Image (tube, rainbow, N blue to C red):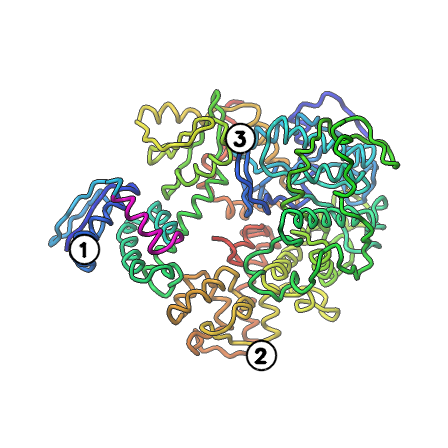
Amino acid sequence: MTVFTCEDTFEAMMTCIYDAWASRLGHDNLRLQLEPVWQQGLFCTYVHVDADFSKAAKVVRSIQRKISYEAYRQVFLAAMSFEPDRLDAIYRFLVLGFASGRKLTQMMSRPEVVWIFELSRKANTEANYFREFTRFSQVGQVYVAHIEPKCNVTAISAAHFADRMPSEHWMMIDDNRQIAAVHPKDQAYYMTRLTGEELKQLRKTEEEEDIYTDLWREFFESIAIEARRNSECQRNNMPLWYRKHATEFQRRARQ
Amino acid sequence: MEIRSGLTLQEKLHILADAAKYDVACTSSGVDRRGREGYLGNSVAAGICHSFAADGRCISLLKILLTNHCIYDCKYCLNRVSNDTLRAAFTPREVCELTVEFYKRNYIEGLFLSSGVWKSPAYTMERICEALYLLRNEYRFNGYIHVKAIPGAPDELLAAAGYLADRMSVNLELPTGESLRKLAPNKTHKAILRPMRMVSDTIAEHRLAIGKSAQMERSRSTQRLGGGIFSGAGGRIGERADQSGFVGDARPLKAQMPAEDLVVRGSQPVNAGRESFSLPAGLRRRDLQRPFVPAGQSTQMIIGATPETDYHLLKTTQHLYQTYDLKRVFFSAYVPLNEDSALPALGTPPPLLREHRLYQADWLLRFYGFHADELLSEERPDFNELLDPKCDWALRHLELFPVEINSADYSTILRIPGIGPKSALRIVQSRRYGKLDFPHLKKMGVVLKRAHYFITCGGRMMYPTPIEERYIARQLIGVNEKENWQIRHGSKTGFRQLSLFEDFQLGA
Ligand code: SF4
C-alpha cells in the first residue's frame, strides 16, 4: 500500500490527488492522508507531496469540466471540514466521478457520494453560522472579528463579508488555526498566517468597547418578550459554543 | 401622557425597541442583492439571523419604532393614546447611525422601521421616508430594509417608501372586521387593505416592466408541484376577482407618482387634495428606479385575542397569499399588555402551541401544495393539539398509504410526514441511479421515526406495522409529545423560524 501525504491546504490536497492519480498504482493500492501522520502503517510506503499550483489547478478544472460545478463545490467544502479522512474520501468521490460524470452528486445510493455530501453539508452549515454569529469590533479604522470554527471556514465566510462590506477595512481571525482573512478598503481580501506575537496583539481587540456595543446589548435585552421567555430554545438556536465571541453574551468589560 | 425631553439614545432605544417587539416579522429574506463598492451592505435571499433573544426568537433586523407617540387607541397595544407611558422619538439621523454602526459590526442584516401614528398618518409616513432616504443616500446603505406602511398616508409617500425599502408590510391585525372594530376602533379593513392592494399591484406592475412574471417567485418545490395555492389562479394579481368582500378599489402606486420635477422639488408641500405633506428632500428619479419592494409584502395577525377559529385564520391566510400575493403571513400569539374587558386577562399565557400549528400549516400551504380546506373544515375548525397538521392529515388519509419511495411522484412523496421539499427532491433525483432503501433515506434527511409508518422501499416497510389509524396515531403522538410540551412550557425547542427549517428539512 502506498500512502500519499500532504499538508492541510486545499492546494496541497488537489496536488496530492493529482500525483496519486498519475502514479498509476491502481486506486485500490493507494491511500491519501493528511499530515501530520501520527501512526505509520507497517507495510506502507509513504510519499510526501508538495503543493503545486499548476497541478492543483488542473485537478480543479477537470472536476468542473468533466463532472460538474456542484461536485467541485462539494469537494471544496469537504476539504474544509474537520474529518481526518477527508482527503481519501474526496479521492474516492472523484474516482467514481470521473467514471460517471455529471450525475455524480445525485447518486446518493453510493457511499462515496453520501460521505462527501455530508462533509460538505457540515462545512457549509458552519460557514453559514459564521455569517450570522461573527461579531466585529471597531479598532481605529479597522473592524476586527475573532472566530473559532471547527471547520476551516474563514475564507468562505470572508467572501460573504467582502461582498457585504466592500468599502471598509476589516479582518477575520481564526484564533485556533492562526490564520486571518484581511480585507483592505475597496480591495480583494487575502488569507494570511499569523505569528504567535501578532495573534497576541490582535486578541486584545475583542475587549474594545464603544457606545455601540452598549447600545447593542440594550437592544438585545429590550427585544425579548418576557411572557415568552425560553432560554432552552435560545440555547438550541444559538449553542453556547458560538456565544463565546458574541458581543451580546459577553459581560461588559468595564463597568 | 408623560413627555420628557432629553432622553439619551440608549433610553430611546430601550423604549422604542421594547415597543416594537410585538411585531413578529424579523426575517431579512426575499431578495438577493450584491454589495457595491462605495456602499455598505448586501442582501441574501434566504435571510440571515444574527442572534437569538431570551425568548428564543431570532434577531435579524434592528426592529424599532420611529416613535411610540400614537393618536390611535388599539386596545391590545402598549402605545395606545389612552396609556400613560413614556414617549420617545428617534431623529432620522439616529435611526441611520444605529443601523449603519450595528450593521458594520455584523449585529444585524438591516432595519425594520415601524411607528405609532404620530400626529397623522401623513406626518408619520413622511418622517419614515425621511429616515429611509437619508439611510439609502447619505449613509449609502445597501442592506435590507423592512418598512411599515401606515394606512391612510398619501399614496406618494407610500410609493416613495416602497422604492427605498425591500419589504413592506401592513398588518391586518385581526381576521374579521368585527374583531377589528371591537379592538382597534380607529382602524378598518378597508383602510388596511387599500395600501396592501396598491403595494401588491405596484409590485406586479414593476415586475412586468422588468420582464419578470407578475407574481412573486415561490420556492423551487412549489414551482415543481404545480398544484398548490399559488397555481391555477391565473392572470394578473390585480385582475383577480376578490371573493371575500375585501376592497380592491386602488390603482397601482406608480401611476400616482408625481411627475419628475414635482419629486425633485423635494420637501416643499405637495397638495394632493387631501392634506399637505412633503416628500423627502431631494428624492430623485434614481430612487424611483430601484426595484419596488423587491422582497415582497407581508402582514401579521394576532392570535388568541378574539374568537376566530384556526380554520378561519388559515382561510384568511390562503386568501391573502392568493389575492395580494403576499410573501409571508405572520401570526403573533397575543400577549396581554393592557387591562381591558374586551381582552383576555393580564397573565393569560400566550397561545404558543396554537401559533406553532398555524405556522406549520402556513408552511404546508406555501411549500407542500396543501390547501386550507384539506387541513381543516367547518366541522373540524381547530388544529389537533397532539399532532402536527401534516401527520394529522396523513392519518385521516391512510387509504393513500403506504407510498413506494422508488416510484411515487414528487407531490405524493412531499405529503409523507417526515419528508420535506429538499429530501423529496433528493429522492426523485437519486433513485434514477439505484434503488433506495431506508438507510439511504436517513442520509438524505428523511425523519424515519415519522415517515416509516407511511412508506415502503422496494415493497417492504421498515418494521412490520399495521396501517391502522389508532395504532399509528398513538405512536406519532409519542413522537410529537415532547415537542408539544416544550412549546407550551417554554422549554427546549419552542417556536422559532429555524426549527421550522429543520422540521421541514428546508435547510442545507
Ligand atoms: S396604531 Fe394601534 S397598534 Fe399601532 S401603535 Fe397606535 S395604538 Fe398601537
In this view, the residue farthest toward the left is A43
Q: In the image, A105: left or right of B215?
A: left
Q: Secondary structure at mark 3?
A: helix
Q: Which residue is mark 1?
A: A30
The amino acid type of the residue labelled 1 equals: Leu
Foreground: B217 or A224?
B217
State which image quarter holds ligand 1: top right
**Which portion, as a residue range, is magenta?**
A55-70
Residue drawn 63% across and 29% down?
Answer: B137
Residue A119 on image: x %, y %: 37, 52
User: Which corner quadrant of the image does residue A199 belong to?
Assistant: top left
- State whether residue B387 appears in this view: no
Query: Do marks 3 and 1 both belong to one polypeptide chain?
Result: no
- Residue A122: % across, % down: 40, 50
Horizontal relation, residue A74 to residue B40: left or right: left
Which chain letter matches label 3? B
A64 in the magenta segment: yes
**Magenta-highlighted stretch: main secondary structure?**
helix
Q: Which mark is residue B104?
A: 3
Q: Quadrant of residue B246?
A: bottom right
Residue A174 in view here: yes
Q: Is residue B391 above or below residue A9?
A: below
- Which residue is labeled 2 in the image? B399
Residue B401, quarter of picture: bottom right
